[in-house]
Image (cartoon, grey):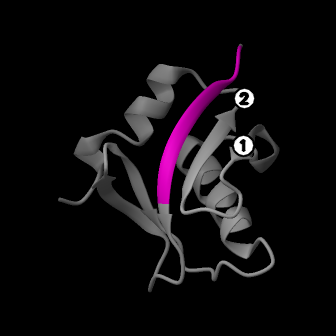
């Protein structure tokens, strides 16, 4: 199964890690971890992998490691399964 890429916008140091709607046309995810020593990126990978039901090693940050806007590469999941797990109907308004 080929890898898929997903663009996300993160908000570090949130009260809890959760899906938070859309921001500039991409999925917004609030991350409880601070953006210090890669902690927010690790928390993002863990959260996305958990939402998709796949191993953390299958999710990588390929662009934007030091930015709020990131591109994730996801192995072992189809575009349909990612869309279903992170679709707007699952997000708070």
What residue is shown at x 76% (from left), y 49% (from top)? 56
Q: Which tag, 2 or 1, sits closer to the chain's start? A: 1
**Label 1: few (<14), some (14–19) or many (≥20) C-alpha neighbours in 10 Å:** many
Q: Which residue is mark 2?
A: 75
From the viewer's perspective, tell me whether residue 49 is left or right of residue 82: right
Check the picture and name the quadrant holding the N terminus.
top right
- Magenta-span inclusion, residue 7: yes
Quadrant in the rendering for residue 30: bottom left
Is the residue 55 above or below the residue 66 in the image?
above
Whether the residues at callouts 2 and 1 have beta carbons within 8 Å, the answer is yes
Q: Position of residue 89 (x, y in %)?
A: 23, 43
What residue is shown at x 69% (from left), y 45% (from top)? 63
Q: Position of residue 66 (x, y in %)?
A: 69, 64
Quadrant in the rendering for residue 46: bottom right
**Label 2's element?**
loop
What residue is shown at x 51% (from left), y 22% (from top)? 79
Magenta region, main secondary structure: strand
- How far apart are labels 2 and 1 at the CA level? 7 Å
Quadrant in the rendering for residue 71: top right
Q: Position of residue 32 (x, y in %)?
A: 55, 80
Is the residue 68 above or below the residue 12 in the image?
above
What residue is shown at x 44% (from left), y 86% (from top)? 15
Q: Outermost residue, top direction?
A: 1
Q: Nearer the viewer, residue 29 or 53?
A: 29
Q: Which residue is mark 1?
A: 59
Q: Position of residue 6 (x, y in %)?
A: 54, 36
Q: Nearer the viewer, residue 54 or 42?
A: 42
From the viewer's perspective, tell me whether residue 58 is left or right of residue 87: right
- Magenta stretch: give its range: 2-9
């Amino acid at each position: 199964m080929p890898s898929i890429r997903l663009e996300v916008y993160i908000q570090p140091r949130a009260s809890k890690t959760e899906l938070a709607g859309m921001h500039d046309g991409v999925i917004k995810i609030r991350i409880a971890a601070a953006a210090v020593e890669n902690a927010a990126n690790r928390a993002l990978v863990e959260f996305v992998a958990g939402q998709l039901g796949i191993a953390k090693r299958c999710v990588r940050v390929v662009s934007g490691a030091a930015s709020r806007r990131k591109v994730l590469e996801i192995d072992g999941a189809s575009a349909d399964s990612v869309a279903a797990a992170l679709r707007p109907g699952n997000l708070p308004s």
